[in-house]
Image (tube, rainbow, N blue to C red):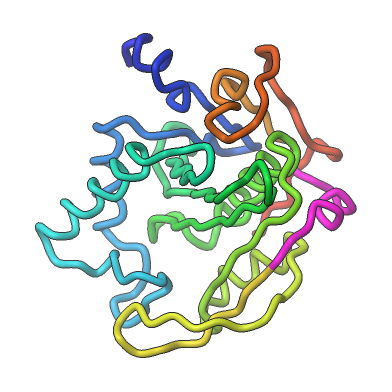
Amino acid sequence: MDARIKTAWPMFALRIRSERLVLRLPKDDELVALMALAKAGIHPAREMPFGIAWSTRPSPAFEREFLQYHWLMRATWKPEDWWLNLMVERDGDLIGSQSLHAEQFAITRTVETGSWLGHAYQGRGFGKEMRAAILAFAFDQLGAHVATTEAFLDNAASNGVSRSLGYRENGLGSLAPEGVARDTRRFRLTAEDWHARPRPAITVDGLAACRDLFGMPPKSARVAKTGRTGKIGVEP
């Protein structure tokens, strides 16, 4: 990538590395690869794990809307309202996407997470590892106080990851991605609970240049490392 683009939009230089994974903002050609991964399958056709039924849209609406969404999140980024939609790599292979969202972060210090994995990469602990990595980034690097997430009651994988990382149940909600209301379970994780547990070791590159984009005061450039144990708990 042209260095001038990274200078103008330093999010492209941000890297979050965990034991097996790298999380980073995709370039346009990588967005196309991410789109193809999602199109190849995330969940069985009879299931819908998302609050918006984007994953089952027919072509060409799926492809157009996938790209438009990612472009929109870049174009409308503000320190007061941002969506960080990262691609997730393992050994150079694209395996899924991890997002982090906040509104008025400098005031609320609250973030929300979301993610998906290509079907071939599910059941191998990657979902937990990438969620743990983005939580370590949010709590230990950005200084978040609270992280929230939400999943349908029948989404055992997502709910299991949330519980395993120390989230507490925070009531029920309702979403209707296909026109029929379905109950969701809401989860909440505080910084106090996060720091009371063994945490994953991550390495963060490129944050200093984009702290202001997150609504944070700038700091001197450095490579940031977090983690109390040096190990990431990974599901079998």
The residue drawn where x is 68% and y is 46% is 107
Q: Quadrant of residue 31?
A: top left
Q: Position of residue 56 (x, y in %)?
A: 24, 69
Magenta run includes residue 199? yes
Q: Provide the residue span drawn in magenta.
A: 188-200
Residue 193: x %, y % from top left? 84, 57
- Picture residue at 62% right of the left edge, 45% below the top: 105
Q: Nearer the viewer, residue 195 or 216?
A: 216
Position in image of residue 22 (x %, y %): 53, 34
Quadrant holding the C terminus: bottom right
Q: Position of residue 8 (x, y in %)?
A: 39, 17
Left or right of residue 13: residue 234? right
**Residue closer to the observer: 4 or 76:** 76
Residue 62, magenta (yes or no): no
| Residue extending furthest toward the top | 3
Give the residue drawn at x 47%, y 42%. 88
Whether residue 64 is situated above or below residue 166 in the rendered picture: above
- Identify the residue at image location x=41%, y=72%: 51
Q: Is residue 132 left or right of residue 64?
A: right
Picture layout, residue 81 above or below residue 3: below
Instruction: In the rendered view, tell whether residue 87 sits above or below residue 168.
Output: above
Residue extending furthest toward the right:
196
Q: Answer left or right for 23 relative to 204.
A: left
In the rendered view, does 31 fall on the left or right side of 156? left
The single residue placed furthest to the left in the displayed view is 60
Q: Nearer the viewer, residue 169 or 162?
A: 169
Quadrant (top left, top right, bottom left, bottom right) of the N terminus: top left
Total marks in image: 0
